[in-house]
Image (tube, rainbow, N blue to C red):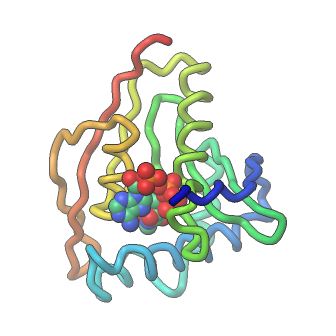
Amino acid sequence: MTAPLPAPFSLRSYQTQDLPALVALFQASVSQLTTQHYDAAQRQAWAPATADMPAWQARLASLELLIAEDDQAIAGFIGFSLDGHIDLLFTAPGHACQGVAATLYAAAEQRLRAAGARELFTEASLTARPFFARQGFSEEQAQTVTRGAVTLQRFAMRKILEPR
Ligand SMILES: CC(C)(COP(=O)(O)OP(=O)(O)OC[C@H]1O[C@@H](n2cnc3c(N)ncnc32)[C@H](O)[C@@H]1OP(=O)(O)O)[C@@H](O)C(=O)NCCC(=O)NCCS
């Protein structure tokens, strides 16, 4: 059996008019792709149905962002800062397990290497933990985040960038 060919995604940078689409993708991704690891109350606390758009606008403006899209829609996005922090990585439910996150991550790592980063770090959800392990990240510490009355588990993970 042969592996399916990767779908043709292109990458581009963020424009302010992408804000509603990225927030909607984030909400759909959390609500549908993390059900194995987080219950409904945890998913709702992580991605409330009514998003704080000014807070999102400020957060996205503070990050470097790459967007993956096909000819129809945005398939995923990654947000990072040049100190090596991977802050956001979300794939649209309809595009899960097609290599979108891997493509976005590879481009972000390339950008961060070019900017001089020596190590990358993130706070990975339980859902994203195997993905980041696959990209060469090691677990540093389990963390518990409190959102209102709800707690969520995640893992601080780090990758040392070896010179190429
Ligand atoms: C984690 C996430 C970004 C992965 O996105 P994706 O586009 O489906 O990932 P890819 O198709 O690029 O997968 C690459 C690798 O990740 C791993 N992976 C992806 N989805 C996985 C899953 N559900 N369970 C276990 N491993 C998974 C696999 O090892 C895969 O390797 P393979 O191609 O050899 O099979 C996606 O599931 C997501 O958006 N999750 C919800 C939000 C979230 O947790 N974001 C991270 C916040 S820190």
Q: Residue at x 40, y 32 (%)?
A: 120
In the image, residue 61 lies at what x, y percent? 65, 50
In the image, residue 65 lies at what x, y percent? 64, 47
Tell which of 133 and 56 is nearer to you: 133
State which image quarter holds ligand 1: bottom left
Could you say which quadrant of the image residue 137 lies in?
Answer: top left
In the image, residue 51 lies at what x, y percent? 54, 78
Q: Residue furthest right?
A: 71
Measured along the vertical axis of the image, is residue 161 above or below residue 132? above
Left or right side of 119 for 52: right
Marks counted in the figure total 0
Q: Residue at x 27, y 84 (%)?
A: 39
In the image, residue 88 lies at what x, y percent? 49, 54
Measured along the vertical axis of the image, is residue 9 above or below residue 161? below
Q: Residue at x 21, y 42 (%)?
A: 139
Q: Is residue 88 something that shows in the picture?
A: no
Left or right side of 139 for 164: right
Could you say which quadrant of the image residue 18 lies in?
Answer: bottom right
Q: Residue at x 18, y 55 (%)?
A: 143
Q: Residue furthest top?
A: 163
Could you say which quadrant of the image residue 114 lies in?
Answer: top right
Q: Is residue 10 something that shows in the picture?
A: yes
Measured along the vertical axis of the image, is residue 31 above or below residue 95? below
